[in-house]
């Protein structure tokens, strides 16, 4: 079985692969400046400030942010571009006017806001077609794409019923038979380990389900949606929010290293990392929230790194970018049919590719 599968799989070796990753509700402020010392010392939001001292006992902002997200600031800066540091007037914004999750993810995954039809986080199948579905439709194998998410609304955002995309989200068990040993163990553990939330599982399960699927099926287009940052923020637990941010940085590092030891992905993979919305800053308690009434909740950020991407590092020149440019960028990288900007779709980011990346 293995010998008959791998030749056809590795015939696709020259195609560029894409990993799209979202960190739900992670503010640009923590990404670019590190831990907020006011929130870290607030008795209302941090029960044990000493737990965060290792991220704050630094002289410069650069040292602070690198202690919080070492992979991003020590590795990604050398192999890609980081958009959204508003201190340099380098801005990334949502184009949807809702500023919460379902509309944000729809915009990221399709390249176009849909404020007429997507006005809540209700579990309603998305009428719009995501870039995952676009790729799966033209692919010549079952698991050409795959999506893994901590939040249980993603089967509806991606429209699992219609799309043909493999989606494992919320408290789903792995179901791509035959299951590997890792997937069977994860299914058992997920039933045994309680989550703090009713609709969101812990990111460790999402991450490990994704890794097991990637190793077994080698999808060309992978989407992973981590959720802890947003849910700990809604809980008002800044300590946990920061620890989740630090942990997710380590998960990004692990995924990158996974692709570098796998012949299918090595020197063939682009990573795009972003968030679905921002959060408030003033008044201080608004950091817990987002939505159209929360100032700054439309402010996001984007990382692009990997194969063929010019290592620009942190963009420090004035510029305006939007979340609706992410799906068009994936379409460009994977040579999918582009969408008309005149119809509201975003324009692909100029990621300054060093070489032709799609055969």
Image (cartoon, rainbow, N blue to C red):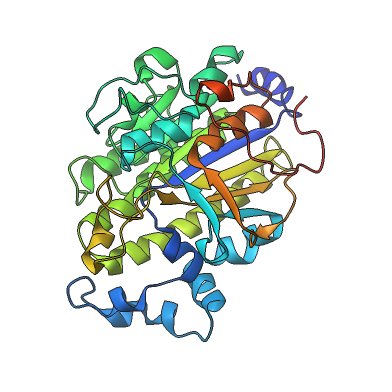
Residue occupying the far right of the picture? 355
- Please state which of residues 243 and 266 is positioned toward the viewer in this rendering: 243
Q: Residue at x 42, y 39 (%)?
A: 209
Q: Which residue does the image show at 40% across and 58% down from the upper left?
A: 27
Residue 311: name its quadrant: bottom right
- Quadrant location of the N terminus in the rendered image: top right
Look at 25% across and 68% down and name the residue there.
284
In the rendered image, residue 247, in percent from the top left (x then y), is placed at: 42, 60
State left or right for residue 191 relative to residue 265: left
Q: Position of residue 318 (x, y in %)?
A: 61, 57
Residue 144 seen anywhere in this rendered image of the structure: no
In-image side of 298 versus 152 (left or right): right
Q: Is residue 173 left or right of residue 333?
A: left
Q: For this view, does 307 lie left or right of residue 104?
A: right
Image-quadrant location for residue 358: top right
Q: Quadrant of residue 19?
A: top right
Q: Position of residue 286 (x, y in %)?
A: 24, 61
Q: Measured along the vertical axis of the image, is residue 52 above or below residue 341?
A: below
Q: What number of labels is visible?
A: 0
Query: Which is nearer the eye, 346 or 140?
Result: 346
**Residue 168 vertical position relative to residue 319 in the rendered view, above or below:** above
Asked whether 147 or 56 is in front, the reply is 56
* Residue in the image at 36% along x and 55% along y: 296
Residue 228 image point, x, y percent: 32, 52
Q: Is residue 162 above or below residue 59?
A: above
Image quarter where the C terminus lies is top right
Evaluate whether residue 235 shows in this view.
yes
């Amino acid at each position: 079985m293995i010998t008959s599968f791998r030749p056809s799989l590795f015939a696709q070796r020259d195609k560029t692969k894409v990993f799209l990753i979202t960190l739900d509700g992670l503010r640009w402020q923590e990404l670019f400046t590190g831990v907020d010392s006011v929130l870290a010392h607030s008795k209302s939001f941090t029960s044990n400030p000493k737990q965060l001292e290792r991220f704050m006992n630094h002289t410069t902002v650069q040292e602070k942010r690198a202690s919080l997200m070492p992979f991003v600031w020590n590795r990604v800066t050398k192999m890609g571009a980081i958009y959204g540091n508003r201190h340099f007037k380098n801005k990334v914004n949502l184009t949807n006017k809702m500023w919460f999750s379902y509309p944000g993810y729809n915009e990221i995954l399709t390249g176009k806001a849909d404020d007429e039809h997507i006005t809540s986080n209700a579990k309603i199948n998305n009428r719009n077609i995501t870039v995952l579905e676009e790729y799966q439709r033209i692919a010549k194998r079952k698991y050409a794409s795959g999506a893994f998410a901590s939040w249980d609304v993603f089967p509806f955002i991606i429209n699992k019923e219609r799309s043909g995309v493999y989606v494992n989200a919320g408290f789903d068990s792995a179901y791509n038979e035959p299951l590997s040993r890792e997937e069977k163990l994860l299914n058992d553990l997920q039933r045994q380990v309680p989550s703090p939330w009713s609709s969101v599982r812990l990111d460790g399960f999402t991450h490990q389900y994704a890794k097991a699927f990637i190793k077994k099926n080698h999808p060309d287009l992978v989407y992973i949606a981590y959720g802890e940052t947003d849910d700990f923020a809604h809980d008002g637990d800044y300590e946990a929010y920061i620890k989740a941010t630090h942990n997710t940085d380590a998960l990004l590092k692990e995924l990158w290293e996974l692709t570098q030891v796998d012949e299918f992905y090595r020197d063939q993979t682009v990573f795009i990392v972003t968030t679905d919305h921002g959060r408030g800053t003033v008044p201080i308690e608004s950091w817990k929230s987002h939505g159209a009434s929360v100032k700054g909740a439309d402010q996001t950020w984007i990382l692009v790194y990997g194969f063929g991407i010019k290592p620009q590092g942190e963009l420090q020149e004035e510029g305006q970018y939007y979340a609706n440019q992410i799906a068009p960028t994936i379409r460009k990288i994977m040579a999918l049919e582009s969408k008309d900007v005149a119809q509201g779709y975003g324009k692909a980011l100029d990621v300054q590719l060093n070489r032709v990346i799609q055969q």
